[in-house]
Image: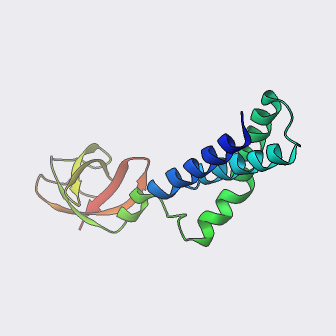
């Protein structure tokens, strides 16, 4: 591949990173493409198979070493969204006996819910989210 094609590919991948919601994946592939293009221009990239190998290695190393610190620097390492439901108030959608599973609505969305309280929950009763486990909410009467 020509050196300029690597540079164009690299800038295209950086542009894709800028146009998509952050994740900082395409950025490192773009930087690797630009670096391979510059190495090829300087005469150090070798044959096509070696250029693709360099591109792959530089991309993987970039993601492995720099992605997590970059996410932390920009404050993008957000907590899991479902964990933010702890303490929220919801409404029971069906009767749920003690230690049984049913449905509850929290923030306008129905969830699988387990009653961890001391009494049964009736349909329409308000409840509070105690904790989450996967996509199951552990609730009790408010």
**Front residue (pair 6, 72):** 6
The residue lying at 54 percent from left, 71 percent from top is 75
The number of callouts visible is 0
* Percent x, y of residue 90: 22, 61
The residue lying at 61 percent from left, 68 percent from top is 72
| Residue furthest out toward the left | 124
Residue 125 visible (yes or no): yes
The residue lying at 61 percent from left, 46 percent from top is 8
* Percent x, y of residue 93: 15, 49
Give above or below for 73 relative to 42: below
User: Quadrant location of the C terminus?
Assistant: bottom left
- Residue 81 as seen in the image, left or right of residue 23: left
* Percent x, y of residue 100: 29, 44
Give above or below for 104 relative to 56: below
**Front residue (pair 88, 19):** 19
User: Quadrant location of the N terminus?
Assistant: top right
**Front residue (pair 24, 91):** 24
The residue lying at 61 percent from left, 54 percent from top is 27
Give above or below for 87 relative to 139: below
Dividing the picture into quarters, in which one does residue 89 lie? bottom left
* Percent x, y of residue 5: 65, 40
């Amino acid at each position: 591949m020509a050196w300029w094609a690597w540079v164009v590919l690299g800038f295209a991948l950086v542009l894709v990173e800028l146009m998509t919601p952050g994740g900082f994946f395409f950025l490192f592939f773009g930087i690797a493409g630009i670096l391979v293009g510059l190495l090829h221009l300087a005469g150090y990239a070798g044959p096509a198979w070696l250029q693709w190998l360099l591109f792959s290695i530089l991309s993987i190393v970039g993601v492995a070493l720099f992605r997590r610190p970059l996410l932390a620097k920009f404050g993008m390492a957000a907590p899991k969204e479902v964990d933010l439901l702890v303490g929220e108030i919801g409404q029971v959608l069906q009767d749920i006996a003690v230690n049984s599973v049913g449905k509850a609505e929290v923030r306008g969305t129905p969830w699988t819910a387990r009653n961890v309280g001391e009494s049964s929950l009736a349909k329409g009763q308000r409840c509070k989210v105690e904790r989450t486990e996967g996509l199951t909410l552990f609730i009790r009467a408010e």
